[in-house]
Image (tube, rainbow, N blue to C red):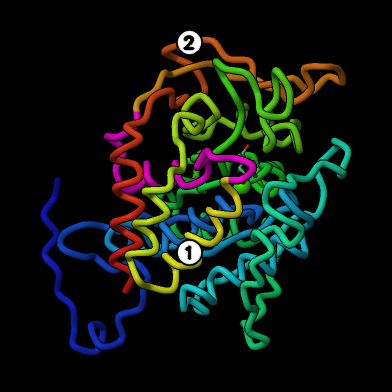
Amino acid sequence: MLSFRRKVSKSAQDGATKRAKIQKGRTLQKIIIDCDPGIDDAVAIFLALAARDDIEVLGITCVKGNVGLDKTYRNAQRICAAAGRLDIPVLRGIARPILAPADLAASVHGVDGLGDIDLPLPDDFPETKTHAVDFIRQQVEKYPGEVVVCAIGPLTNVAVALLFDPLLGEKLRSIVFMGGAAYCPGNMNDFAEFNFMVDPHAAEIVLQSGAQLVMFGLDVTQQTRIEELHLARLRQNGNVCSDIAERLLTAYAKGDQHLHDPCVVAWLIEPSIFSGTQSRVRIVTEPGPQFGRSMANIDPHGNCLVMTQVDQQRLFSILLSKLAQWP
Ligand code: RIB
Ligand code: CA
């Protein structure tokens, strides 16, 4: 690993933006979070923003998923405002799946998508007119080979960006995503997981894109369980984001005790707590009882690394400690 010798002028230090800063010899991972907040999306975003020594969030792109696009977009703004990060670009994406019916939603996140806890939305949140798909493509052109797309909702935005530029999969560093159920039953029926069932065609486009893919399906996310001791730790943290996370997870755990989306961000922070199997994965897009199913088989030359194990204790330790250090 090259040791970085950093010549930073006084002005650069004073004007230290959050972009491309070399900290303690480590290069920040540049990520775009594509999401459908959603309570577990919110916790994943808080974790990414708290992990300032590991991650630089270039922007948050929103997609229709748990709730409609207007709500996922405003919820992403609410989350950034709560985190004191009005500098993070929040972009509207696509409001419906590519081909699948547009009526699937997830009630576990409440009517507003954030547990109906009335998280405030400042009326001066800076609006960005750029479309999510254009933002993804622009950032990949700006940082060739560096951008990690961290997709934690249906893959509609990511798939359309790949359709616009078939070489995008080679230009970005990787697509790490929460979705699917490779070697286990789904959470919508025996076969399909929510994100993939909302937009199976998008999932198939991403899976066949040739990009470096890491899949956090129910195989691994359902090994996590939110317990009362985790909520108590969040209450003890005594900061705004931990308090909000505790309120959100208390509401969420009534319907789903699994911490799906934060697994993706935790892997970026500490990959060693996960293990997986290189696999060949494709999506059932034909109408029928298996619509949206992720069909997988183990293949060392497969298109996707499928995560299958997580050290749940270390996962929650990373989440709780990062949120405790909230700047
Ligand atoms: O199946 C879990 C996934 O669906 C998570 O991303 C959750 O936020 C919902 O979008
Ligand atoms: Ca989500």
Real-space Cα distance between discs 2 and 1? Answer: 34 Å
Q: Toward which corner of the image does residue 23 lie, by quadrant?
A: bottom left
Q: Residue 217: x percent and y percent?
A: 54, 30
Q: Which residues are magenta?
A: 254-274
Comparing 10 with 184, the one in front is 184
Does residue 260 show up magenta in the picture? yes
Tag 1 secondary structure = strand
Count of numbered circles in the view: 2
Taking the spot 45% from the left edge, 29% from the top edge, the residue there is 223
Tag shown at residue 298: 2
Looking at mark 2, is its residue's CB closer than 8 Å to ligand 1? no
Amino acid identity at mark 1: Leu
Q: Residues within 10 Å of mark 1 (few under 14, many from 20)?
A: many
Looking at mark 1, is its residue's CB closer than 8 Å to ligand 2? no
251 displayed left or right of 224: right
Q: Is residue 263 above or below residue 235?
A: above
Q: Residue 158: x percent and y percent?
A: 64, 46
For residue 177, say whether it is visible.
no
Q: Toward which corner of the image does residue 122 lie, by quadrant?
A: bottom right
Q: Earlier in the sequence, mark 2 or mark 1?
A: 1
Taking the spot 28% from the left edge, 40% from the top edge, the residue there is 314
Taking the spot 78% from the left edge, 45% from the top edge, the residue there is 105
Location of mark 1 (residue): 58
Tag 2 secondary structure = strand
For residue 227, say whether it is visible.
yes
Q: Which image quarter holds the C terminus? A: bottom left
